[in-house]
């Protein structure tokens, strides 16, 4: 059910009042008359909400968006789909000025440009920008965003909703949120109406997001997902075992040599971990005579799964650990014991279009890992592994 306005704090009431005053000024000045005429040609565009932001429908929309965590005036937003105009209006009144509208329709994006002008493409100057294309193909440099809002349920893609959710996870900053704001007539991803929490959970299963809230509203459905701050797992996981030989499919050639841990003794732990890329701390019981620095705790990126981009199919899942340290004692330590404390979950496994795309993403994963593990909150977790004695 919709959240009643009378339960909102005074600042939120003032916000909605300001939306109404601004709308009246726009109507008196006829500033949006040309926008309204063009918008009426777009079947999916909620015209009434875009020209009368103070309507009950838009007040309800504002209530929904204000439930999302992490919204602040300095945030960056991506709004996807043909219902973007009222969402953009609400975001702007929340103080968010860096907004990207994404849609497959150039006609609709022309409407957005007419309403908000042509924003600069240089630097991080505030403004409402547009990008035409399938959301799943949005360039990575256009992120990350603190909030992504899907305004209809094709989810901005000709592919399936799951692909859009994976892309949204890659583009959302840690601690940020993904909002599914759907109208009843565009609920294509739901097997039945009304929706259930289980349906949303199925859509995002295996992705690094938590369900923050979801609710049935008068004209549709609203679900809010959140990436954990620092991508952090609720409970750290221990993975330890003997370093074994992998399949030899090019990790070293890609510049990311990995240590493979024997997965057989870890079946129970791995069964609870969605395939994907994780990060944390690694401690090697290095061969005798190696320098002391090689025995220290080091940052690490892990891939758990079947490596769909390079594998031929049918291979058993592997546990590959790329330790962010150049070992001085040597490059091979098969048979040594490796202990890993898994702290965060970055992304699910993805089949990329070739090694170049995979390598580029691995570099991104490594950069994110370094950045997150350098934060005081996660740096402190290394002490847990440092206390582990030699095996």
Image: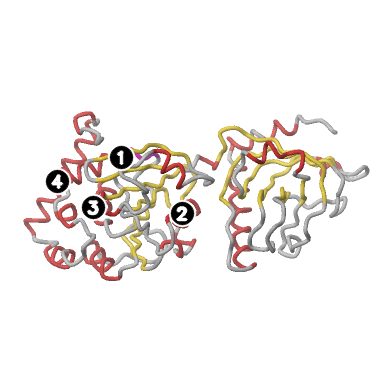
Element under label 3? helix
- 124, above or below 3, in the image: below
Q: Is residue 365 magenta?
A: no
Closer to the camera in the image, 335 or 161: 161
The residue at which mark 3 appears reads as 86
Question: Closer to the camera: disc 1 or disc 2?
Answer: 2
Q: Are marks 1 and 2 in contact (CB under 8 Å)?
A: no
Residue occupying image coordinates x 31% and y 44% = 193
Q: Which numbered disc, 4 or 1, marks the residue that appears first in the sequence?
A: 4
The residue at which mark 4 appears reads as 55
Q: Which numbered disc, 3 or 4, marks the residue that appears first in the sequence?
A: 4
Q: How many marks?
A: 4
Q: Which numbered disc, 1 or 2, marks the residue that appears first in the sequence?
A: 1
Element under label 1? loop
User: Dot 4: few (<14), some (14–19), or many (≥20) neighbours within 10 Å?
Assistant: some
Measured as percent of width and height from the top left, residue 4 is found at 21, 32
């Amino acid at each position: 059910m919709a959240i009643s306005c009378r339960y909102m704090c005074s600042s939120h009431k003032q916000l909605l009042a300001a939306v109404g005053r601004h709308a009246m000024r726009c109507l008196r000045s006829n500033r949006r008359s040309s926008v309204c005429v063009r918008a009426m040609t777009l079947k999916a565009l909620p015209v009434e909400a875009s020209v009368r932001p103070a309507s009950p429908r838009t007040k309800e929309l504002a209530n929904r968006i204000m439930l999302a965590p992490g919204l602040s005036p300095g945030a960056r937003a991506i709004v996807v789909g043909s219902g973007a105009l009222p969402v953009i209006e609400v975001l702007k009144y929340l103080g968010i000025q860096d907004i990207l509208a994404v849609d497959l329709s150039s006609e609709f994006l022309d409407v957005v440009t007419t309403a908000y002008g042509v924003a600069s493409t240089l630097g991080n100057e505030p403004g409402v920008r547009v990008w035409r294309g399938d959301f799943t193909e949005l360039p990575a440099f256009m992120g990350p965003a603190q909030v992504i809002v899907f305004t209809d349920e094709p989810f901005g893609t000709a592919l399936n909703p799951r692909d859009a959710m994976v892309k949204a996870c890659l583009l959302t900053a840690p601690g940020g949120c993904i909002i599914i704001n759907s109208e009843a007539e565009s609920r294509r991803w739901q097997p039945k109406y009304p929706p259930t929490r289980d349906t949303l959970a199925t859509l995002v299963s295996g992705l690094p997001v938590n369900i923050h809230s979801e609710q049935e509203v008068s004209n549709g459905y609203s679900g809010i997902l959140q990436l954990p701050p620092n991508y952090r797992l609720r409970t750290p996981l221990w993975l330890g075992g003997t370093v074994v030989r992998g399949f030899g499919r090019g990790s070293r050639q890609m510049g990311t040599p990995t240590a493979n841990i024997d997965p057989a003794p870890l079946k129970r732990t791995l069964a609870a971990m969605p395939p994907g890329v994780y990060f944390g701390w690694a401690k090697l019981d290095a061969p005798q005579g190696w320098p002391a620095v090689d025995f220290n705790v080091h940052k690490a990126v892990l891939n758990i799964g079947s490596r769909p981009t390079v594998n031929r199919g049918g291979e058993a899942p592997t546990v590959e650990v790329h330790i962010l340290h150049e070992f001085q004692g040597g490059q091979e330590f098969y048979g040594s014991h490796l202990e890993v404390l898994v702290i965060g979950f970055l992304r699910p496994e993805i089949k990329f279009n070739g090694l170049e795309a995979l390598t580029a993403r691995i570099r991104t994963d490594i950069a994110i890992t370094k950045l997150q593990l350098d934060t005081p909150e996660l740096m402190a977790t290394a002490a847990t592994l440092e206390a582990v004695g030699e095996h």
